Amino acid sequence: MSRGETIRWIAGDRAAFLEINRLRSSGAAPERLHTGPHRWVEAWRDTQPGDAPIVLKWYAPRRPALRRLRDRLLGRTADTREWRTLVALEAAGLPVPPPLALGRTPSGDRVVAMRPVGEAPLLDRLRRASPEEGRALLASLAATVRRLHEAGFVHGDLHLGNLRATGDAVHLLDLGRARRTTSPRARDADRARLLYSVERDAGGPPAREALRLALGGEDRLDEARRRFLADHARGRARRHHRPGADWQRLSAAPGREGLATADLDAGVLREALLEAPVRRREAPRRDGRVTVEEIDAKGASDPSTWIRKRVLAGSGRRALADRLRGSPARRAFHRSERDHLISDRAARTLAFLERRALGRVPESVLLLEQVGEFDLDTHRPASPEEARHLALSLMDWLAEQHAIGLGHRDAKGGNIRVAREGRETPRFWWVDLEDLVGPVRLPESARLRALVQLNASLADEAFDAETRRGALARYHARLPFDRPLDEIAREIHTKSLARRHRYRGEWDA
């Protein structure tokens, strides 16, 4: 848009029209607050001290002319939706920027003028806040969302980037996707998106849990979060998961092809996969087909160690199957990369190579980051208190995944890495990445199977009967079973014994 273009005002306050026209013709330069390909935001301030600034939010034409005309006639353009919503919500007493004017230019750009609100982005406030201040801000945020929904609107793009704070008050911004609806599903989608944003950007699981409880509607919220995460993962994978974006192609002779993340040098990754000397090698697994090695990381300061996992097919039938379904390393890379779009529950993969011969894949190699301090199944807590704290934290971690449809097909302690030193709450990661599942609807049978796998893999001397019962009760409190807890405990006990793993039955259910 040319700054000399005249704005034709469509709606708003005449005094605001005159003020904006005067500011734009005064020769002053605005402050650019946001720049995007189809939208930008600028703030205009008068030279007179004490005068309130004006924010102009510009929208460039995006669609073919006929569709743009249709949206204009139906009042469905983003600027019209934002203007209409601002007017309605301000009249209802909601904390939104006071709307001033709606206009367009001869070139087709459209503009919404408003007064700014909020002292600082809510994201910045939450990151700097003490625990008490953070809880107060999250409670205020939940109250603002409830008021929005009670007014008959949903935001449509509710995340921390669209919220500002003044004291304990939270203001709503960027209402171009807002719409009138009383649909419970639409309201739950607002809350699900917001929970994801808070967990990802401002406080992790504790902040998410505080906000989840403050928002309410827990009986529907987990399902809404699962739907949001599935859609979010699909959209981001479609945009980013391809060579030239997040990934790069990797090749090595003879006949080795694969993929790698784009942020590390291909030569370094190729050397790590094929030639790097071994720092430590674990005992071979699965009849010698799987070898796990620690190697020195190059080109990365954190972590200083990488894990190289080599898998041999071991039989012609399995090698042929891996050619059709993808090798274990390929499956682990793709599933881990997709999972990292929505979660931090798994170790991060860096690259993989698979060797192809005569239409089969007899061998594949995966490179991933080293995480944690120990495998869960090898750890022996120093005290009953430590065992209880570790078990309850583990159940919190697992139940939260299951609640939003994230599972694992081989949920044993040997596939879970733990970091504890210097942490109030232990940190867990999955490391058997080809078995990651979700987001999908997890039936109770799948959740029970995971609990059986985990219980069977942990030795009696590590976690006693009382600790296991308490951990199961903790899981049930977050994600209840359809059957009585005693019945569930007996089933886990019986099926754990049948697996003939480390559990020997001292948990006498």
Image (tube, rainbow, N blue to C red):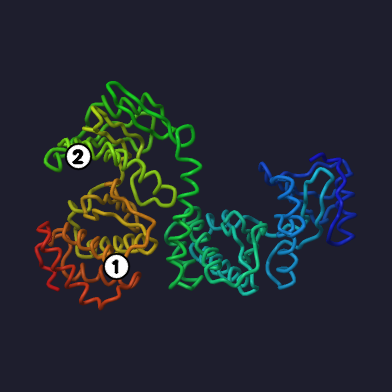
Q: Position of residue 19 (x, y in %)?
A: 88, 54
Tell me what residue is drawn at x 50 percent, y 62 percent. 192
Extreme residue in the top direction: 253
Label 2: how many Cα within 10 Å (few below 14, some 14–19, many 20+) = some
- Up-down relation of residue 21 to residue 195 (above or below): above
User: Dividing the picture into quarters, in which one does residue 50 lie?
Assistant: bottom right
Q: Label 2: which residue? A: 318
Q: Position of residue 53 (x, y in %)?
A: 79, 54
Q: Secondary structure at mark 1?
A: helix
* For residue 422, side relative to residue 246 (left or right): left
Q: Position of residue 188 (x, y in %)?
A: 52, 67
Tell me what residue is drawn at x 82 percent, y 39 percent. 2
What is the spatial separation of the Cα atoms under label 2 and label 1, in whole angstroms?
Answer: 31 Å
Give the amino acid type for the residue marked by disc 2 in the picture: Arg
The disc placed on residue 86 is: none
- Up-down relation of residue 133 to residue 57 (above or below): below
Q: Secondary structure at mark 2?
A: helix
Give the amino acid type for the residue marked by disc 1 in the picture: Glu
Q: Label 1: which residue? A: 444
